[in-house]
Amino acid sequence: MENVIGIIEKRIRNASWEDAENMFTTFRHLAATLEQDKGNILCLVENKLGMLCLKVQEMVKDFEEKEILRIKQCLQDFFEKNSNTDSSVLRNEMRKIIRQEIGKEFDVFRNDSERAILKSIQEAVDYFLWHANNIIQEFKIAVEILFEIPMGQFEYSVDIYKGSNFYCIAREYTKTSGNKFHFISRYFLSQPARRKLVFHEMIAEASSCVSRNCDRVLCDIISGICSTIEYYASQLKDLGNHPIVQIGQAIQEGLARRSVENGTNKLDHRRLLTV
């Protein structure tokens, strides 16, 4: 790259003032176009991953609805098979069922959804890298034509984002009823009535537990997707910046030396650099 910079500086120094001004103006236009292209790519990637966020929301919502129905059915089956169980024992056993079922199914959902999500993210990243390489190659070709010089190998590389742990473990959520009437009325209810009351409480608790865990999973996944966007966005900002700075400095140095050697009006030189 140092040889290229030296040649560009020499071409600017030996060119006519009109040609030097044209090269400088054209190069600034190329740099601005590259910057605009980078912004367009970022918008495309954000749109793709934004669509993935919507897909994840639908995926989690669908899982939540099915999981609530499934656990309700498990509790219903257990309740019917244990019609003579004491209400306190019934509550403890149903909570075990809720904890076990949620832990089991959330693991399955995590594994299945993780594969689907990572595949979609990889597709978005491949799309990003393909477009990034295209615009940097277009920039390279334009610079080669402008200064009539081969730039050599000039590819855009990026470190692949390694963070894929979007999930937290499932937690058991219990909530004590704030309705004191439940606790008072239990003392006056028959054992079958108490068991039925416990059953309805456990149904509500299971729904709450599933929903809270789904909220956490959704939050973790969305956070991971956003981290991916931010990671590649930060790298995209640096795309082509180094050669742009180097070529820009070479042009300015060539113009400065040209002014000294050819006695070009310094005001014209300053005017060009501030365009």
Image: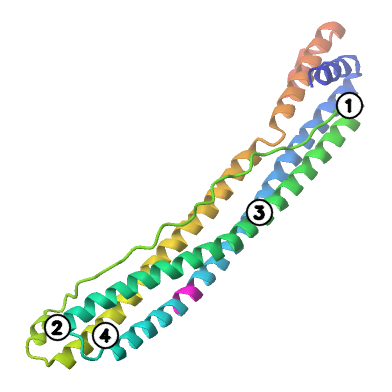
Badge 2 amino acid: His
Judging from the image, what secondary structure is the residue with disc 1 in?
helix
Looking at marks 1 and 3 on the same chain, the residue that comes earlier in the sequence is marked by: 3
Q: Residue tagged by mark 1?
A: 147
Q: Is residue 152 left or right of residue 235?
A: right
Name the quadrant of the N terminus.
top right
Q: Position of residue 10 (x, y in %)?
A: 86, 15
Number of other residues with Cα within 10 Å of mark 1, as a class: few under 14, some 14 to 19, many 20 or more = some
Q: Residue tagged by mark 2?
A: 182
Contact between marks 4 and 1 (CB within 8 A): the answer is: no
Q: Between marks 4 and 3, how big is the CA–CA gap? A: 44 Å
Q: Position of residue 136 (x, y in %)?
A: 78, 39
Looking at marks 2 and 3 on the same chain, the residue that comes earlier in the sequence is marked by: 3
Q: Between marks 1 and 2, how big is the CA–CA gap? A: 85 Å
Q: Residue tagged by mark 4?
A: 200
| Colouring rule applied to residues | rainbow
Q: Nearer the viewer, mark 1 or mark 3?
A: 3
Badge 1 amino acid: Phe
Which stretch appears magenta? Answer: 61-65
Looking at marks 4 and 1 on the same chain, the residue that comes earlier in the sequence is marked by: 1
State whether the magenta stretch is mostly helix, strand or loop: helix
Q: Is residue 244 left or right of residue 172?
A: right
Q: Residue at x 17, y 75 (%)?
A: 178
Q: Residue at x 77, y 24 (%)?
A: 247
Q: Between marks 4 and 2, how big is the CA–CA gap? A: 12 Å
Q: Residue tagged by mark 3?
A: 122
Number of other residues with Cα within 10 Å of mark 4, as a class: few under 14, some 14 to 19, many 20 or more = some
